[in-house]
Amino acid sequence: MPSKTVAIFLCTYNGQKYLEEQLNSIRDQSYKNWKIWVSDDGSVDETKKLLEAFQETVGHDRLQIFDGPRSGFAANFLSLISNIDLSADYSAWSDQDDIWDKDKLGNAINWLERQPDTTPALYCSRTRLIDENGEEIGYSPLFRRPPSFANALSCLL
């Protein structure tokens, strides 16, 4: 049985400083059935050139680049997720300065596949924070309320 596809939504804006490491961490995932859809919000640095070079490496079918709405990060992400031509079995969101552990997608897919088909599911985890030298400096807050779909929606408000 073929593995399910993960759509990775990545928004960029002048992200050249961090982007290469982030793209490499996606390329090196243990779970290999992913596609990256990037919306660039008008970068004036080398971000687009980095994206295009990575696209040549992984293939145009694995990375597609779109021009963003140039209205900030929220509108940029919304432009991606509202594009009806972009579909996959699962979705993952990425900031341009993230660095993913090799098993990030694999762990998420394994957990999601064990959930009942009749129940909406959302996978989340804490973020390990690092400084500009790659040194670990802590974790994102541990919220009091347990992870749930309703709690995830209330965090957006």
Image (cartoon, helix red, strand yellow):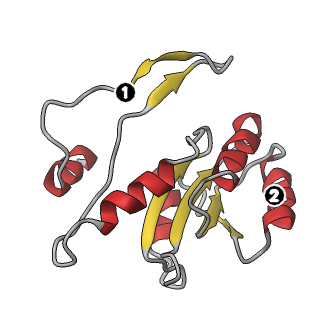
Name which residue lies at 48% across and 76% down.
4
Most foreground residue, 122 or 29: 29
Percent coordinates x, y for residue 141 in the rendering: 30, 25
User: Mark 1 — residue?
Assistant: 140
Categorize mark 2 by other alpha carbons within 10 Å: few (<14), some (14-19), many (20+): some
Most foreground residue, 16 or 41: 16
Q: Secondary structure at mark 2?
A: helix
* Placement of 70 over or under 35, stated as above or below: above
Q: Left or right: where does residue 26 sit relative to residue 93?
A: right
User: Mark 2 — residue?
Assistant: 54
Percent coordinates x, y for residue 14 in the rendering: 71, 42
Residue type, mark 1 in image: Ser
Categorize mark 1 by other alpha carbons within 10 Å: few (<14), some (14-19), many (20+): few
Q: Secondary structure at mark 1?
A: loop
Q: Is residue 73 visible?
A: no
* Placement of 59 over or under 125, stated as above or below: below
Percent coordinates x, y for residue 61 in the rendering: 72, 77
Name which residue lies at 52% across and 48% down.
103
Q: Left or right: where does residue 78 sit relative to residue 15?
A: left
Residue type, mark 2 in image: Phe
Q: Left or right: where does residue 14 sit relative to residue 71?
A: right
Q: Quadrant of residue 8?
A: bottom right
Q: Is residue 26 visible?
A: yes
Percent coordinates x, y for residue 82 in the rendering: 44, 74
Name which residue lies at 16% across and 71% down.
119
Quick one: label 1 or label 2, which is nearer the N terminus? Answer: 2
Tell me whether the residue at label 1 lies in contact with that at label 2, contact meaning CB atoms closer than 8 angstroms.
no
Q: Quadrant of residue 60?
A: bottom right
* Placement of 3 over or under 153, stated as above or below: below
Marks 1 and 2, Cα distance to the nearest angstrom? 29 Å
